[in-house]
Amino acid sequence: MSELTPLSEVGEFGLIRRIKDKVVLQHPSTIKGIGDDAAVLEPEEKQLVVTSDMLLEGIHFDLTFCPLKHLGYKAVAVNVSDIAAMNAKPTQITVNIAVGARYTVEAIEELYEGIRLACENYKVDLVGGDTTSSRAGLVISITAIGEVAKGEAAMRSGAKVNDLICITGDIGAAYMGLQVLEREKQAFMADPEMQPQLEKYEYIVGRQLKPEARMDVIYELKEFGIKPTAMIDVSDGLASELMHICSQSGVGATIYRENLPADNQMLEAAMEFNLDPVMCMLNGGEDYELLFTIPLEDYEKIKNLPDVSLIGKITEASEGINLANKHGQAFPLKAQGWTHF
Ligand code: ADP
Ligand code: MG
C-alpha cells in the first residue's frame, strides 16, 4: 500500500488546490468556480431553487460500513433529490467540510471522488465550498442550486382533491439495507475475523449506501407533458412525506396497500428480521424516490411509465389520511418519520 499523507502536510490551501484540479466545469451558467472569494453564476431566464443538506458522522452516516466515496456520492445525490422534488434541474453545488486530524489527504480525495462522480452523473458543477477542522467526526454540508422555468416548480402545497398519488421506484429497501448493515457491524465487532455476508442483500444495501436522485423521472415527466401538482422526495418515509403534502395542500389522502411498490429482496429481508414489510415501506427512510400528485386527466399519460406506480388518491381533508386494503377497508395512517434526537 502506498504512503498516506497527513492533512497537515498539504494544509488547507494544498487540499483545496487538489480538489480544484480535478473539477471539470460543464455548465454554461458557471462563470467562475473554485478559486475566488465567491463563485459567479449567470442563470438563464429561470427561477432559481436552492437547498442544503448536512451530514454528520455518527448521526447520518457510519464510516465503519459507508466508504468515503459512497458518502461523497450520497451527499450530492440527496441534495439533487431535493432539487428534483421541486421539478427543477440541478446546476451547481458548493461543498463544506469539517475534517478531524485523523483524516488523510487520500481519504478526503476518496470523498471528493464520490462527489465528482455524482457531479458527472447529474451534470452539476462543483463551484466552491469551505474547509475547516473538526474535533469530533466528519461533517459534510452541501448546497445545491437548480433552475426551473417560471411557474413550473412543484410545491408541496399544490395537491387537489381527486388528484392521483404516484411514487417512483420501490420503497423500504434503503431501510432494510441499513438493518442488514447494522447487523453485520454488530457481528464484526463481536468477532473481527468475521467477514460480512452481504451478497444476497446487494440491492438493498446499495439502496442505503448509494442512493440515486430521480432526475431521470423529472426529464421523463417533462417529455410526457406531465406537471405534478405537488411533489416531495422520500427521505423520511412515505407516510411522513404524504402528511407534508396533505397538510400543506389542505387535503386528505387514501393509499392502496396493494399498490405499494416492493422489491423482493426487501420483502425477504423484512421476513428474516421479523418486520412488517408494509411498515418498512410506509416508514422506512432514505429511498430518495419521488412522491407526487397529478390531475386525474393525466392518468393515460402516466400509466405506461415503467418506474412510476399509482398508489392512491387525494381526498377531502375531512376524510383524513388512510391506508386501504384490497377489501376496501381503510385505516388511519400514522407516520413515525426519522428523528435524530
Ligand atoms: P475564503 O477565505 O475566501 O473563504 P477559502 O480559502 O476558504 O476562501 O476558499 C478558496 C476557494 O476554494 C473558494 O473558491 C472556495 O469556494 C473554494 N473551496 C474552499 N473549500 C472548499 C471545499 N471543501 N470544496 C470545494 N471548494 C472549496
Ligand atoms: Mg473559506
Image (cartoon, grey):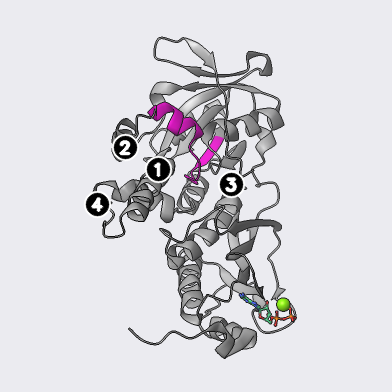
Query: Distance from label 3 to label 1 (Cα)?
Result: 27 Å
Query: Distance from label 4 to label 2 (Cα)?
Result: 13 Å
State the count of labels.
4
First in sequence: mark 3 vs mark 1: 3
Q: Give the residue number, with chain letter if any, for mark 4.
A: 199
Instruction: Answer yes or no: is residue 159 visible.
Output: no
* Residue 269: numbered disc: 2
Q: Is residue 121 above or below residue 28?
A: above
Q: Quadrant of residue 76?
A: bottom right
Do the residues under discs 2 and 1 have CB atoms within 8 angstroms? Answer: yes
First in sequence: mark 4 vs mark 1: 1
**Secondary structure of residue under mark 3:** loop
User: Dot 4, how many residues are within 10 Å of its Cα: few (below 14), some (14-19), or many (20+)?
Assistant: few
Kind of residue at badge 1: Gln
Q: Give the residue number, with chain letter if any, for mark 3.
A: 85
First in sequence: mark 3 vs mark 2: 3
Q: Position of residue 305 (x, y in %)?
A: 40, 39
Q: Give the residue number, with chain letter if any, for mark 1.
A: 179
Query: Distance from label 3 to label 2 (Cα)?
Result: 29 Å
**Secondary structure of residue under mark 1:** helix
